[in-house]
Image (tube, rainbow, N blue to C red):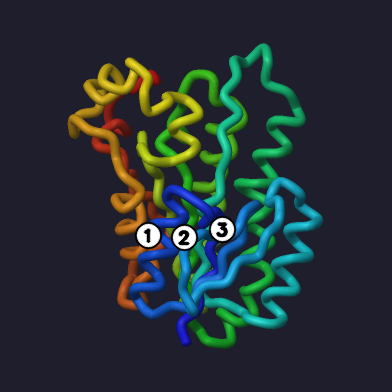
């Protein structure tokens, strides 16, 4: 049985990715603050606050002892939009735990199984904001840190048959994080869409397709890479 451990599958991009893995015949283990709403015999949910580094580490170690995985997708995220003056050290620490420490704990817990199998797929979900975005001090910096993790881990793990890659979404509608910034009924929606070279917002399925590309067992010669799924916003500017 192919098994994937997937964070953030309770909604949005994570939920779409969970659905894609189920359709590909994977056993999906969701780790998030809330259970994944997907109904499938191939899915089970573990609830934990990934901003709590100690609770996260305990949960993933227990899971790996019971059901080690050779595919990991770290999708959970949070924004905490604030100008520089209002961003706190606590904000930075919380998102560092969520975006970086949780990824480290997941990989460390499952790495023995990957090395034994001489196979692994690690996909980190970063953001177009890693290139910089106003009022995203904690978010942009920790999402940028994921690129460094992936490039470093790719070098260390290539000889073990493990690939490590990043998907960096741009403005993706139908997600809780996007709707925190622009509610669906906001007049800003049409103005923001006009700034996107592709002329539309992305969807969770746009991102899940990129994840599945990196997670494919056949994608064995691609590692340390970042794929922007952003409608062209990574080569321009965006304000929203």
Q: Residue at x 34, y 76 (%)?
A: 24
The residue closer to the viewer here, 125 or 200, is: 200
Vertical position of residue 200 compared to residue 149: above or below: above
Vertical position of residue 91 compared to residue 208: above or below: above
The residue closer to the viewer here, 6 or 112, is: 6
- Quadrant in which residue 113 is drawn: bottom right
> Circle 1 is placed at which residue position?
211
Residue 160 location (% of width, % of height): 51, 78
> Circle 3 is placed at which residue position?
7
Q: Residue at x 40, y 45 (%)?
A: 168
Mark found first going from the N terminus, 2 or 3:
3
Mark found first going from the N terminus, 1 or 2:
2
Q: Residue at x 57, y 24 (%)?
A: 81
- Can you say which quadrant of the picture contains the C terminus? top left
The residue closer to the viewer here, 222 or 97, is: 97
> Circle 2 is placed at which residue position?
123
The residue closer to the viewer here, 235 or 95, is: 95
Evaluate if marks 1 and 2 touch, with contact meaning CB atoms under 8 Å apart: yes
Residue 146 at least partly seen: yes
């Amino acid at each position: 049985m192919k098994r994937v451990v997937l964070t953030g599958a309770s909604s949005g991009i994570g939920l779409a990715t969970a659905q894609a893995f189920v359709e590909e015949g994977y056993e999906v283990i969701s780790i998030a603050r809330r259970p994944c709403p997907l109904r499938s015999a191939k899915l089970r949910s573990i609830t934990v606050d990934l901003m709590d580094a100690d609770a996260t580490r305990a949960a993933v170690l227990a899971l790996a002892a019971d059901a080690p995985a050779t595919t990991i997708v770290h999708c959970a995220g949070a924004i905490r939009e604030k100008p520089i003056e209002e961003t706190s050290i606590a904000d930075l620490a919380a998102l560092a735990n969520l975006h970086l420490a949780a990824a480290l704990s997941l990989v460390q817990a499952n790495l023995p199984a990957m090395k034994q199998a001489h196979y692994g797929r690690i996909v980190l979900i970063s953001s177009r904001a890693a290139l910089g975005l106003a009022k995203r001090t904690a978010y942009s910096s920790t999402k940028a840190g994921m690129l460094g993790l992936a490039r470093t881990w790719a070098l260390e793990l290539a000889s073990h048959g493990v690939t490590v890659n990043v998907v960096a979404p741009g403005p993706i509608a139908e997600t809780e994080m996007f709707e925190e910034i622009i509610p669906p009924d906001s007049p800003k929606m049409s103005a923001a869409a006009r700034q996107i070279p592709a002329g539309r917002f992305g969807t969770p399925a746009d991102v899940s397709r990129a994840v599945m590309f990196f997670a494919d067992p056949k994608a064995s010669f691609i590692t340390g890479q970042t794929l922007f799924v952003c409608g062209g916003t990574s080569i321009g500017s965006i304000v929203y």
